[in-house]
Amino acid sequence: MTDHPMEENNTGTPLFQERAELGEVRRRIEAIRHEIAKIIVGQEDVVELIIIALLCRGHVLLEGNPGVAKTLTAKLISKTIDSDFSRIQFTPDLMPSDVTGTSIFNFKNSEFEFKKGPIFSNIILIDEINRAPAKTQAALFEVMQERQVTIDGHTYPMDNPFIIIATQNPIELEGTYRLPEAQMDRFIFKINVGYPNLNEEVKIIESFHKDRDLLQLSDIQKVVDGPQLLKDSSMLQHIVVEDRLIRYIAQIVQKTRNHASIAIGASPRASLALLHGAKAMSLIRGRDFVTPEDIVDLSVPVLSHRISISAEREMEGTTASSIIIDMVKSIEVPR
């Protein structure tokens, strides 16, 4: 790909125009990061992965101990986007109809009318998704994959963009319901939200010491709207992915299916997630082509929730992330 202003790609779009548009996308992404940094200290990698998921139109699972700003980060992301937002607090008594909606009898016209639930929004924060019973979790299957809800034989499509950001606490077992593998596979990423380092924690304490109203979210500006987000997402089709990198993605996913420490490997959905995620990663890094580093950097958030560790390795305390890191290192990087 060259910088000649008259050169065109195979779609007939001038390349200089593509690159100008890619630059605009990157500026909007940087604006989102800037707004979030007004309140959140650190967590740059977490924010980057959520933005990548937004560009890929994929759902995200945030996992971390209490108090590490999982919910706050998700709320701040929604604050920067001018679109509908809803929050659903999952609890053990939550019913599927509380999420998707229900049919209500209208006495005026003697007909049932469908009342939409909170899932009918653009960005949906599902807090503590593992606290709702399996029946309620199952209600999300269709809406996450097909982006529609079927009630009483009628199908109701979701508006675009439609993105679910879910959180869960990994350390509590009482009153929780483990997400089944089929539902986990519908999240493009599982993002582990860790504790801040020493310098970051000092900065957090100092910020709250100086301003007790730091969590007032009114200062967060909307920097992109829903239609623009969809347009930015469409720019991923202009990102170049060489054949050797497509094969590299396939090798990584194939390796999970014959690895001694992995009982159940990843599905082809993981390959597609790696592909789309790597294209979005290259975009926010200011490139119009994918590199092997983009794929390597996304291997853990894409694969860690899609594999099952063998019983022996799990008893040893081995994590999915460590297995994936070692596995990827064992595969020759294409040059």
Image (cartoon, helix red, strand yellow):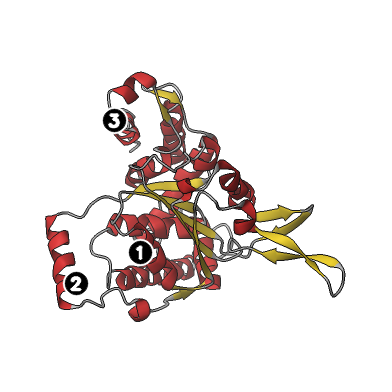
Q: CA distance from mark 3 to mark 1?
A: 32 Å
Q: Position of residue 26 (x, y in %)?
A: 38, 67
Q: Which mark is residue 72?
A: 1
- SS label for mark 3: helix
Q: CA distance from mark 2 to mark 3?
A: 40 Å
Name the kind of residue labelled 3 in the image: Asp
Name the kind of residue labelled 2 in the image: Phe
- SS label for mark 2: helix
Q: Sequence-wise, which precedes: disc 3 or disc 1? A: 1
Which residue in the structure is indicated by mark 3? 326
Which residue in the structure is indicated by mark 2? 208
The residue located at (42%, 57%) in the rendering is 52
Q: Sequence-wise, which precedes: disc 2 or disc 3? A: 2
- SS label for mark 1: helix
Question: Depth check: 76 or 260 in front?
Answer: 76
Q: Sequence-wise, which precedes: disc 2 or disc 1? A: 1
Label 2 CA crowd tier, 10 Å (few <14, some 14–19, many 20+): few
Q: Position of residue 136 (x, y in %)?
A: 58, 48
